[in-house]
């Protein structure tokens, strides 16, 4: 009749909608600005993860953007159609896309690692049927009695053989019940000569 009870209640979980919105915003910031604001996306990632690798990549992204802008600026053609301008534009856009992809992958992995583990089942796990129960190394007091030494558990012993006397009594009872079954049922006594 009594169940194991209600599972423990969990506190309010943070909304993942805000986290997803920030991921989309910073990914689009990097890609839609054609890579010019990729440093801002890397700054957000470095602040969130606090890993030295991400801080180094933030510096590398900033340096790469300066190199791409400098390469575009030194292009001698009036419409930046020379190899310097083309290389600078491709490098800037490529850096923006690479930072956007790296940001998404790393931020998602960081979010999954930071998420608390799902609660374990609220009922105790059952031991395997063939495994011996765990042995406690410490002794515990038992119902007010002093600590008793732990006795290792043994396999259940087979039932002792039936003593011969019980077998003999069973045999005699079986014979008696057979004899009673074979006898015809007794007839009720009938009285004669009493008439009115």
Image: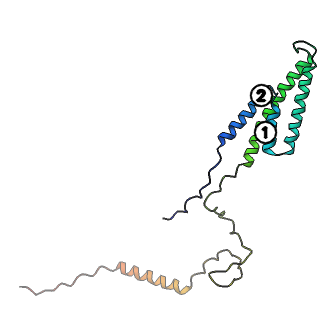
Q: Seen in the image, is 125 located left or right of residue 196?
A: right
Front position in the image: 184 or 8 = 8
Q: Residue at x 88, y 14 (%)?
A: 81
Q: Residue at x 72, y 36 (%)?
A: 23
Instruction: Name the N-terminal-most of marks 2 and 1.
Output: 2
Q: Assign the C terminus to one quadrant of the image.
A: bottom left
Outermost residue to the top: 78
Point out residue 104 in the picture as x, y percentages from the top left corner. 76, 36
Q: Which residue is mark 1?
A: 44
Q: Relative to 186, say whether 119 is above or below.
A: above
Quadrant of the image occupied by residue 158: bottom right
Point out residue 68 in the picture as x, y percentages from the top left corner. 89, 25
Point out residue 123 in the picture as x, y percentages from the top left corner. 60, 61
Quadrant of the image occupied by residue 177: bottom left
Front position in the image: 76 or 31 = 76
Point out residue 60 in the picture as x, y percentages from the top left corner. 89, 35
Q: Residue at x 85, y 26 (%)?
A: 92
Q: Seen in the image, is 66 located left or right of residue 21?
A: right
Q: Could you say whether the residue bearing mark 2 is in a helix, strand or loop?
A: helix
Q: Could you say whether the residue bearing mark 1 is in a helix, strand or loop?
A: helix
Between disc 2 and disc 1, the foreground one is 1
Q: Residue at x 58, y 58 (%)?
A: 7
Q: Relative to 188, say whether 13 is above or below.
A: above
Outermost residue to the left: 196
Q: Which residue is mark 2?
A: 31
Colouring style: rainbow
Q: How many marks?
A: 2
Label 1: how many Cα within 10 Å (few below 14, some 14–19, many 20+): some
Front position in the image: 103 or 185 = 103
Label 2 and label 1: CA atoms lie apart by 15 Å
Q: Are discs 2 and 1 less than 8 Å apart at CB?
A: no
Label 2: how many Cα within 10 Å (few below 14, some 14–19, many 20+): many
């Amino acid at each position: 009749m009594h169940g194991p009870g209600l599972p423990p209640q969990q506190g309010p979980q943070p909304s993942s909608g805000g986290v997803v919105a920030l991921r989309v915003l910073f990914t689009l910031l990097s890609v839609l600005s054609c890579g010019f604001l990729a440093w801002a996306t890397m700054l957000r990632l470095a602040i969130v993860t606090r890993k030295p690798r991400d801080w180094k990549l933030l510096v590398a992204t900033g340096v790469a953007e300066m190199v791409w802008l400098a390469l575009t600026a030194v292009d001698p053609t009036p419409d930046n159609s020379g190899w310097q301008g083309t290389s600078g534009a491709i490098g800037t856009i490529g850096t923006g896309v690479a930072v956007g992809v790296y940001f998404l992958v790393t931020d998602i992995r960081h979010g999954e690692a930071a998420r608390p583990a799902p609660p374990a089942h609220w009922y105790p796990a059952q031991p395997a049927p063939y495994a011996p129960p765990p042995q406690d190394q410490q002794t515990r007091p038992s119902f007010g009695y002093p600590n008793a030494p732990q006795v290792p558990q043994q396999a259940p012993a087979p039932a002792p053989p039936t003593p011969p006397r019980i077998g003999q009594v069973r045999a005699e009872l079986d014979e008696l019940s057979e004899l009673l079954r074979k006898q015809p049922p007794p007839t009720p006594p009938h009285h004669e000569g009493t008439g009115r």
